[in-house]
Amino acid sequence: MLSRALSLAIGDVHGAATLEEFRVVMQATIDAIAAEYRLPGQKMHVLSEYDPAECVLVTRPAAPGPPVWSAEGVAAEGDLDGEPTGVPERAADEVAALPRILEQLESDLRRAAQQAEEALDHFLEPRGLLALADPDWLTDAGCGLRPWLADLQAAVRQGRTVDALIGARAWHQYAARAAQEVERLLEANSAPETHFRELRSRLRLYRAKAGQLGFLESAPLSELHTAARAALQDRPVDLDAAEQRIAEYARALSAPR
């Protein structure tokens, strides 16, 4: 799956250029292949000393913007330039892989929204949350991915394979950009919960250290621990206040006696 995803990503003349874009496109392709053939999924990871978004692997010609498709499924003049690479017969296969990508985007957007709702309910003024993604990515009648996909599927049924192949590759690139933004949403919206778990783990470690040092019965330390634990339990949790209480407990635990 990895080699096929890489060959498809490299072969797309207007496709991925940076290391991060390749990761997103290849992950989407791997997910689609795994789902189609019922294979175990694989997760892409990038290990690099450089910023993946700035690391250019392949120099590409200027990419077209998302085309506006007419009711007949033909792109407006000037939206797509050049002939597609590959043979038109590949159009049906490439278009058939796109719904899986759209399903994953929709699922990730729902998960990002759920994370935001849970964070707003659980935490006091949580930092890191981003506004939810523009729904036009998926539903806008002009260039949304879902109606655009419907036009591509219609083009395949009508035998307009060249149009479908060009459109499928432009669709894939636009979806890859959308996936990058959705990933930013997921990361930002999960940040408050991640911070909360780190603080809770940190408090447990300090409590264990107090036990190892024989300080569990110390009244001042016990009061500080109780305050820190309460700061993590009260709803909504004030993460800044909880971090401050835990830091006070840690300083007291490390103070010379």
Image (tube, rainbow, N blue to C red):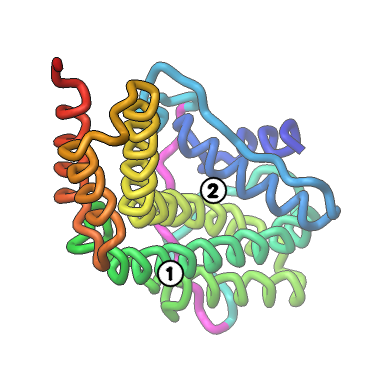
Identify which residue is drawn at 64% across, 36% down.
11
Picture coordinates of residue 203, whole percent (x, y): 32, 39
Q: Is residue 76 visible?
A: no
Q: Which residue is at the front of the view, 120 or 236?
A: 236
The answer to whether 78 appears left or right of 108 in the picture is left
The kind of residue tagged 2 is Gly
**In the rendered image of this protein, does residue 83 appear above or below residue 202?**
below
Check disc 1 and give the amino acid type.
Answer: Gln
Which residue is disc 2 drawn over?
Answer: 82
Where does the image place residue 78, in percent across and percent down from the top left? 42, 60
Residue receiving disc 1: 114
Instruction: Decide: few, some or many residues near mark 1? Use Cα within 10 Å; few <14, some 14-19, many ≥20.
Output: some
Quadrant of the drawing holding the C terminus: top left
- To which quarter of the image does residue 247 belong? top left
Q: Which residues are magenta?
A: 59-71
Q: Secondary structure at mark 1?
A: helix
